[in-house]
Image (spheres, helix red, strand yellow):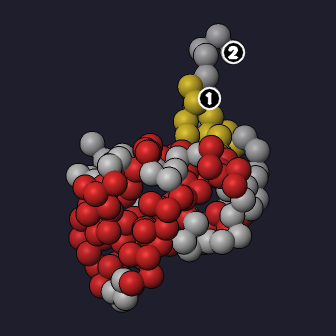
Amino acid sequence: MERDVADVLLEGVTSADRINLYWFLRPVRNDLTVELARFTLGDFVRNPRHCIPEVNVCDAVWQYLPYLLWKFRLSAKPLVRHFGPTQTWKKWQWDSWKIYLNMDDTPLEAIDQEIWRRCRRPPVFQYGPYQGVVFLGATLSFIQVPLPTAGYLIHMPLSSRA
């Protein structure tokens, strides 16, 4: 069974569904709106464009997410031990995460090697314009539906009565 990079890197710390997206990203992106407070990190991992509709901001956060998760993993263990579960943290407790993040000067290359040693590297996907429904070959048992927001192609079975 494959797991998300968030699940692997947060293992033993907390669940991605218990981390508020706004407070988690606040130390690195001060241009985010408070509306993000209604989402969790798990929501963002499952559907990034739903949480952050601005493409350039969403892509930048998505690209930097494994590094943030790694740094959070290192700093959150003592913070969780001291403050309790992340879903109960207040602003000043999240500011402690910001202090830990700013103190860490580990080079991104070292973090990158450590992350992808533990996790399977995701495939590189180039977002293109929406192309509509694409029929595959001569068999009409499946249609291929592009999902540009998630970046995946899924197969939808067609009924045999069609």
Q: Mark 1 vs mark 2: which is more N-terminal?
A: 1
Q: Nearer the viewer, residue 24 or 152?
A: 24
Q: Is residue 151 in sight in this rendering? A: no
Mark 2: few/some/many CA within 10 Å (<14, 14-19, 20+) = few
Q: Which residue sits at x=32%, y=79%?
A: 111
Q: Which residue is mark 1?
A: 140
Which quadrant, please, contains the C terminus? top right
Instruction: Count the labels in the image.
Output: 2
Residue drawn where x is 69% and y is 43% of the image: 134
Q: In the rendered image, which quarter contains the N terminus? A: top left
Say what secondary structure mark 2 lies in. loop
Q: For the point 62% across and 34% down, which residue is it?
A: 143
Above-or-below relation of 107 to 97: below
Please tell me whether mark 1 sits on a helix, a strand or a loop. loop
Q: Amino acid at mark 2?
A: Ala
For label 1, count other residues whose C-alpha is less than 10 Å away and answer few (under 14), some (14-19) or many (20+). Answer: few
Residue located at (50% from left, 53% from top): 90
Residue 115 visible to the viewer: yes
Residue 82: x percent and y percent? 28, 57
The residue most toward the top is: 161
State if disc 2 and disc 1 touch (CB < 8 Å). Answer: yes
Q: Which residue is mark 2?
A: 162
User: Residue 105, relative to residue 13: is it above or below?
Assistant: below
When asked about the image quadrant of residue 75, the answer is bottom left
> Which of the 4 image quarters holds residue 58?
bottom right
Q: Position of residue 74 (x, y in %)?
A: 29, 69
